Image (cartoon, rainbow, N blue to C red):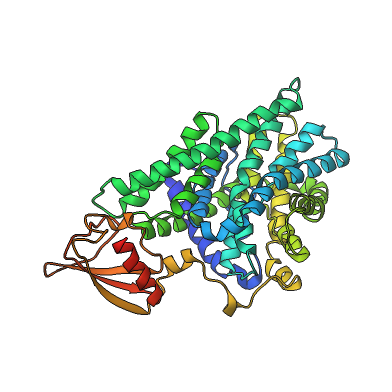
Amino acid sequence: MNLTIENIVLIGSLLLFISIIVGKTSYKFGVPTLLLFLIIGMLAGSEGIGGIVFDDPKIAQFIGVVSLNFILFAGGLDTSWPAVKPILKEGILLSTLGVLLTAVSLGVFVHFVTDFTIYESLLLGSIVSSTDAAAVFSILRGKSLALKTNLRPTLELESGSNDPMAYVLTIAFLSLVVNKDQSLMSIIPLFLQQMILGGAAGFGFGKLSKLVINKIKLDFEGLYPVLVIALMFITFSATDFIGGNGFLAIYICAVYLGNQDLIHKKTIFRMFDGLAWLMQIVLFLTLGLLVFPSHVVPYIGIGLTISLFLIFIARPVGVFISLMFIKMKLRRRFYISWVGLRGAVPIVFATYPLLAGIDKAHIIFNIVFFISVTSVLIQGTTLALVAKWLNVGLPEKSKRIYEKEKFLEEIPKAVMKEIVITPQCFAVNKKIVDLSFPKNAIIAMIKRADVYITPNGSTVIESGDTMVVLSDNMEGLDQVQECLNQ
């Protein structure tokens, strides 16, 4: 079946509907949701029962890049700074040095077991060197896996921040494959430029985005998530334009925004949570459509060999060496090594060699696809089991509830207090969003001259207002009083 204007909406909506319904029950059979999305895309493709003809790596890459923007941004918004601050060093080491070591060790192995040149081998290693944010976020959160100490924040920080490093390595080694006269040292300036400009731009656009969101006055609450989407794409494209790493920029920008007081923050969070799931489904469906199973079959043998080496050797090498100077129990290191899921991101990165037209591009693409599928199938289905074996899991009743989860889940407040705003209050003539209001308290209502107001972040506090404040405990009410009178 050829995709036309007349049938694309119908086919797309049917595939989306089927994916959601199948994904809802997939964990009953121990199959990761994202793998189901990929299989549905393959079944709908030209060699499946759907017969949809799709063989355009350029469109697939465009969809992949747009989807990764949403997935990384949503992951950044959901990253709690207090949670990741204690493990920031581990996360940075894993997402930089760990990715480099994984890429190099796998690349050397590929060079020995195939007829690839060393640069082609390192290119393949770079493509699959990072853990996939979509896969890790969806599996850890979808299974509500409770882990001891700071394991979950470590894994989520690594998976959300290591794609930029893999992207830089992919582009660098691709340039060495295409331009055979370049030296290995020539990629160092590119690496420094991408990471430094990407990091700086991400932080700068984060501060600018907060200013825009809180200062601009929109008439409709639903426009605020749209505004954030525009700011996200501006951050990515502007950073890329100046030669920085756009993926790194949007992740840092989102982490900054997620830990600030924003107008209609809850609405923004919920919108991006839904959009991230939508983009994950669209991304995996698209990549499933792009793959021709008959082209993958000839590479099952070598693909399985490389995949097993990645899972059991290259990934642990990257983890253990990068964390060798970090005080951490051995079983935690082993579990971090095991949660090295490869998903859609490597497949998206594998489209870059296809568009560059290098000789072994199709072989690399098919091997990468097989590695991603086996990784999600082998590692994704055993995360809970391995956590139990290594004794790093927690009983469900002991699961830690993070501040962001409390913020979104509408946990009932235990205590209430009416606070009258006097003319001397610090809060007078200030927006609620500018007060640094305690996270464990909310302003349920404001009484102003016999009129009851439902407040939001842009509501300006006036002298004489009576605020009805709800909090988790009395300590939260004391923090509210300090905030209003500082």
Counting from the top left corner in percent of width and height, residue 185 is at 74, 26
The front one of 450 and 397 is 450
The front one of 399 and 472 is 472
* Above or below, 195 relative to 268: above
Residue 484 appears in which quarter of the rendering?
A: bottom left
Counting from the top left corner in percent of width and height, residue 104 is at 78, 41
Residue drawn 61% across the image and 42% down it: 164
Residue 153 appears in which quarter of the rendering?
A: bottom right
Residue 117 appears in which quarter of the rendering?
A: top right
Residue sitting at the far left: 449
Counting from the top left corner in percent of width and height, residue 84 is at 57, 57
Residue sitting at the far top: 181
The front one of 258 and 131 is 258
Tag count in the figure? 0
Counting from the top left corner in percent of width and height, residue 351 is at 63, 38
Tell me if residue 295 can be seen: no
Q: Quadrant of the C terminus?
A: bottom left
Residue drawn 63% across the image and 78% down it: 395
Residue drawn 44% across the image and 44% down it: 206
Viewed as shown, does residue 194 lie left or right of 454?
right
Viewed as shown, does residue 193 lie left or right of 104?
left
* Above or below, 482 relative to 354: below
